[in-house]
Amino acid sequence: MLVTRIVVAGAGAIGASIAYHLAVRGARDVVLAERAAVAAGASGRAMGGIRQQFSTAAEVLLARASIRFFEELGPPFFHQVGYLFLASSEAGLAELEERLALQRSLGVPVARVDPSFVPGLATDDVLGAVFCPTDGVGAPAAVTRELVRRAVERGVELREGTAAEDVSGDLVVIACGAASARVAAHWGVELPVRPLVRQLFATTPVAELPDRLPMTIELETGFHFRRRDDRLVVAMADPEPRWSDVERVDASLLPDRLARLARRYPPAADTAVDRAWAGLYDMTPDAHPIIGPVADGVYAACGFSGHGFMQAPAVGAAVAEELLERASSLDLSPYRLARFADGADFPETLIL
Ligand SMILES: Cc1cc2nc3c(=O)[nH]c(=O)nc-3n(C[C@H](O)[C@H](O)[C@H](O)COP(=O)(O)OP(=O)(O)OC[C@H]3O[C@@H](n4cnc5c(N)ncnc54)[C@H](O)[C@@H]3O)c2cc1C
């Protein structure tokens, strides 16, 4: 098939990265169609965590291949402060050790550490910790806008306020996050992508936060926090998953999250919730994305299941290569839609 016009549907981190990399590789006629505005979806609401510490090779490789791009962007888009996982049970420690072996075998510099290197962190209950210094935290909306800026500079046509269904082209790339299944249905394609509500909050300012405070995660509870300017951003999964596309904050959970923060990071004990917001994960049954052709003239890049921001650089480059050069230097075979028909059997379990 000779592709002339490529329509990228959705200007979140994934669509923006695909459009940018298509332009870099010489695609001449690319339309980035965004129903609302750039970064209006999950990319404007994300935590911004960028980690290579996953439980399956498929996810480690996508994140690892993205790190160099974030390093080149640097601050204020990316702060390479590392990711620190804390285990407070023997079972948790064994899990960390198992993942560490996988991650190290794939070249990720994860190591056991004494977590007391983080000033202020309460570690009395911690049995063991692992740290990856090349992980870090980013600014998802700003990175997305930067990718769009670079794409437009190289000739991509950005159409905000435009549904992709209304733009004609030879090939559409569905990168619509939690709306992807609905958008794909327009082309008669069924995608197993479901929206899951997740919420975050930012604290009021916390005095003297360490410059290099890592993203810190309790393995057993999934409770985690990061520094953003002079505040902390805090997250933890709801006790019961909310399978819905209604982006509503459940305020009843916030006192518990503040108490956990005060317990784990006592310097923030007097802080309060300044702003809370909700967004949608686009979940697949195995929490791996769907990347590849799904019908004639239709390609999917969605279902990133809560970790698409950190994977966007590698995904954009790989999709552009596959579309323009028929082959990608990154192996995309683990992410094909067909795996669900075959019975996907390697679920990613480290979903934060
Ligand atoms: C609370 C929260 C925390 C998160 N934390 C992290 C994290 O720490 N690290 C990480 O890597 N990821 C995180 N994620 C996930 C991450 O935000 C996404 O995986 C990532 O931003 C990739 O988004 P996307 O481009 O696929 O989708 P989105 O950013 O949702 O973009 C999809 C776009 O498609 C548009 N659209 C919808 N329908 C149409 C249509 N018909 N035509 C045209 N456009 C359309 C939407 O308006 C939207 O702008 C988090 C997500 C949430 C919600």
Image (cartoon, rainbow, N blue to C red):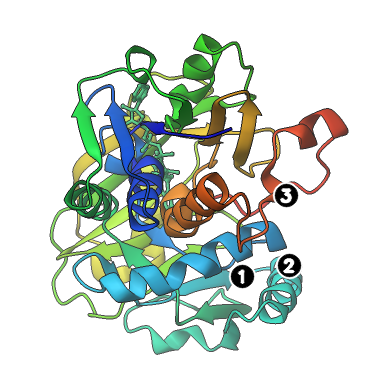
Q: What residue type is labelled 1?
A: Ala
Q: Report the residue marked by disc 2.
A: 95
The local secondary structure at tag 3 comes to helix
Q: In this view, does 49 lie to the left or right of 230?
A: right
Q: Report the residue marked by disc 1.
A: 87
Sequence-wise, which precedes: disc 1 or disc 2? 1
Q: Report the residue marked by disc 3.
A: 334
The local secondary structure at tag 1 comes to strand
Spatial CA distance of label 1 from label 2 is 9 Å
Q: In which quarter of the image is the N terminus?
A: top right
Q: What residue type is labelled 2?
A: Glu
The local secondary structure at tag 2 comes to helix
| x, y percent for residue 317 | 47, 57
Q: Is residue 303 left or right of residue 41?
A: right
Q: Which residue lies furthest to the right in this view?
A: 342
Ligand 1 has an atom within 8 Å of the beta carbon of the residue at disc 3: no
User: Would residue 73 be seen by someone viewing this image from the given angle?
Assistant: yes
